[in-house]
Image (cartoon, rainbow, N blue to C red):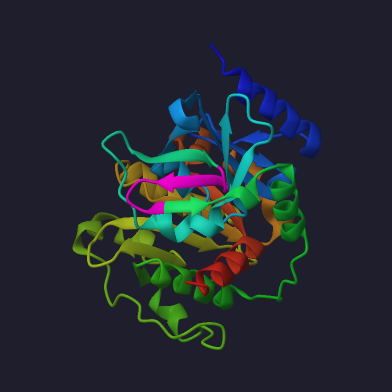
Amino acid sequence: MPNQVKISFLVDLERKYGKLRKLPNSLSLFEISDGVCRVYIRYSKVHNRNQSFYGIRKEDLKQLDGFNSVICFLSDNQNEPLFIPYSEFEEVFADLEPASDGQIKAQIYQEKDGMELYISNAGRFNVEGFVGWKSLELLVDKSKIVSLPNFNHSQIQTLIGSIGVHRGYDIWIPNIDRNKLDWNLSEKFVCKSDLPERYLRVNDVIKEVDVLWFKRGSSDLSAMFEVEHSTPIYSGLLRFNDLHLTEPNLRPKFNIVSNDLRRALFLRQINRPTFKTSGLSELCNFLEYKDVFNWFNRTLKY
C-alpha cells in the first residue's frame, strides 16, 4: 500500500516547485526545478520516546554526490518535513560502511532542546535549524545565485581531479591533458602513472576518459567523468556504453559534465534506444559546471 505521508509530501513538493523528475534505480530520489535540487525522501513511523528509525541507502547517496541536494526525513504527525542539506553531512556519510542490507542506520529524536539526528557509528547532530519548508527554499534560492567563472575543459578536469583526491581517490587523467591542468585553481595532485592491469581489455576505451576515480590503493574504478565542453556528448556516451557492455559488472558512476545549456541535448542522447537497451540510461548522470564548482568549494571546507 502506498505511503500516504510520502504521497502527501510529493503533492506539496510538486505544487511548490513544479513537475518532479524521478531519478533512476530508486523509489525515493527526485529532482526539482529542472535540476536545481535533488531530494532524497526517507520515511518512518514514530516509535517509543518520540524516536523515528531510518535506513539510508549508500547507493542512493551516490546519486546526491556533486549535486545541490537534501535528505528529507518524514514521519507520522510531523508539522513540517526535516530537510538536511547533503553537503553538510557528505563527509560523514563518505566515511561510513553500510549494514549488511546496504543501508546506513539513522534515528531522529525529538528532544526538549530541539530535533536531533543520530547517525550510526558517526554521532548525534542537532538539526532543529533544518526543520520546515524554509530550509529547502533557502537551498534552492542559493543554488540559483551562483557567480560562475568561464571555465575551460582543462579547468573542469582540474576541479574534478581535486575533488576526487580530497574524497580519498586515486586519479587518472589522460597523459596528453596533464600539462594543461590549472594549478591556480587547486593544490597540485599526482595522477596515477598507469592504469591497473585488470583493465587491459578496455584500456583503449578508458585511457581517454577525461577523469577517472579509483579507490585509493586499489584497482577498483569508482567513477568516470567525460567533460564535453565543445565535443559531442554522444561520443562520451558511446565510450561509456562500450565499457558498460564489455564489463557489465564493473558499474562505476558514469558522469557527463558540461554547461547547463547542453542538459537538454544530454537528455535527448541518453534516451536513444541504444542506451536504453544497454541500461546506460539508468546509470549515467549529467553534472553541470555549476555542480562541479559548488562541489569543489564544499570540499575545500573539510
Extreme-left residue of the structure: 197
- In percent of width and height, residue 87 lies at 55, 58
**Which residue appears at 42% of the width and 57% of the height?**
92
**Which residue appears at 69% of the width and 23% of the height?**
8
**118 part of magenta stretch:** yes
Residue 264 visible to the viewer: no
Which is nearer the eye, 75 or 290? Answer: 75
Which is nearer the eye, 57 or 36? Answer: 57
Which is nearer the eye, 171 or 64? Answer: 64
- In percent of width and height, residue 147 lies at 75, 72
Extreme-top residue of the structure: 1
Residue 105 visible to the viewer: yes
- In percent of width and height, residue 79 lies at 69, 32
- In percent of width and height, residue 224 lies at 43, 58
Q: Is residue 198 left or right of residue 271?
A: left
Count of labels in the image? 0
Extreme-front residue of the structure: 112
**239 part of magenta stretch:** no
In the image, the segment drawn in magenta is: 112-123
Q: Is residue 72 left or right of residue 206?
A: right
Q: Is residue 21 left or right of residue 111?
A: right
**Which residue appears at 38% of the width and 50% of the height?**
252
